[in-house]
Amino acid sequence: MPPPKQRPHDRASENFEAGYRVVQQHPLFHRMLLGSARAMRESATRYPPNGWALVDPFGTIYVHPKRLAAPEEWAWVLAHCCLHLGLSHFQKRLKQAEWDAACDCIVHRFLAPLKIGRPPVELSGVPVDDLPGRTEDALYRYFCEQGIPKHLQSISLTGTRESDMIDIDRATPAAELGWKRAFAEGLRLAVADAVESAGPRDERGKHSRALTAAQRARN
C-alpha cells in the first residue's frame, strides 16, 4: 500500500523547517538563529499575504504560515532577513522607500555568491550587479537622485512595493550593536570554515594538520 499523501500544509511545514535548518547550520547565521532571532509562522501573527516574510529590528521573522515552497527557497528568504539585521538596515531615512530598496539590492548581491538556497522565482535574476553603487548609502543617494528603477521596485520579501523591514521606528542602538556582533562572529566562523576547507588533503581525503596558519590562509 502506498504511503498516504501529505496534506499541503504538512509538507509546507516540513519544507520550511528544512530550510530553517540549512540557515541555522550555516556559520554565517548560526549565532543569529541561536540568539535572539526567531521565526514566527502562525496565522494569528502579521505576515505578507502575497509574499514570504517580514522582519523587525528585534529579530522576529514573520513567515507566511501556509506558503508551500522548497526548502532552498525558505533558506534564501531566512538568510535575506538575517542580513537585514546583521548589516544594520533598520534605519529611518528621509526617503524610506529608496533606503529600503537599496538595502534589498545589497542583500540580493550579498547572497548571490554564498549559494544559500535559491531565491523564489519572482525574486530570481534581479539585475543588481550593474548598479552604480556598492554600498547601501551609495545606492540610496542614486535612487534619491534618479529614482528607483521599475524592475527594482518590488524585490522585497512582501511580494509588493512595501518593505520587508517593519517597526523601524522601534530600532534601538543596543539591538543594532547586538546583531552587528553576532554577524561579525558569523563572518569570522565562515572565513575560518572556508580556510579549513581550502587546505590540502591527504590520500584519504582528510585535511592536513601540518600547515601553519599563514599557509592555510594563503590556500
Image (spheres, rainbow, N blue to C red):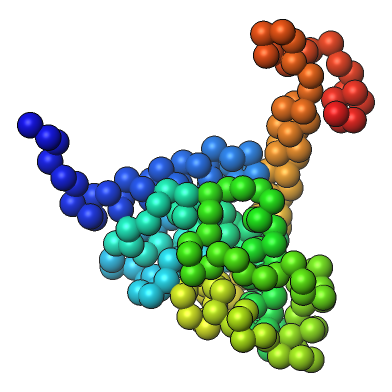
Q: How many marks?
A: 0
Task: Check the image and name the residue furthest to the left.
Answer: 1
> Above or below — where is 163 with respect to 112?
below
- Residue 102 place in picture, x, y as percent: 70, 75
- Residue 79 place in picture, x, y as percent: 56, 54
Quadrant of the frame with the N terminus: top left
Is residue 89 at all visible to an observer of this figure? Answer: yes
> Above or below — where is 151 with respect to 219?
below
Quadrant of the frame with the C terminus: top right
**Based on the displayed image, in which of its 4 quarters is residue 174 positioned?**
bottom right
**Based on the displayed image, in which of its 4 quarters is residue 217 positioned?**
top right
- Residue 112 place in picture, x, y as percent: 66, 56
Residue at horizontal 77%, vertical 74%?
Answer: 131
The answer to which of 151 and 75 lies nearer the viewer is: 151
Is residue 78 at all visible to an observer of this figure? Answer: no
From the viewer's perspective, tell me whether residue 148 is left or right of residue 26.
Answer: right
From the viewer's perspective, tell me whether residue 93 is left or right of residue 117.
Answer: right
Residue at horizontal 76%, vertical 38%?
Answer: 191
> Above or below — where is 32 with respect to 44?
above
Residue at horizontal 24%, vertical 50%?
Answer: 10
- Residue 154 place in picture, x, y as percent: 54, 79
From the viewer's perspective, tell me whether residue 168 is left or right of residue 185.
Answer: left
Residue at horizontal 36%, vertical 48%?
Answer: 15
The answer to which of 99 and 148 lies nearer the viewer is: 148
Task: Check the image and name the residue furthest to the top.
Answer: 203
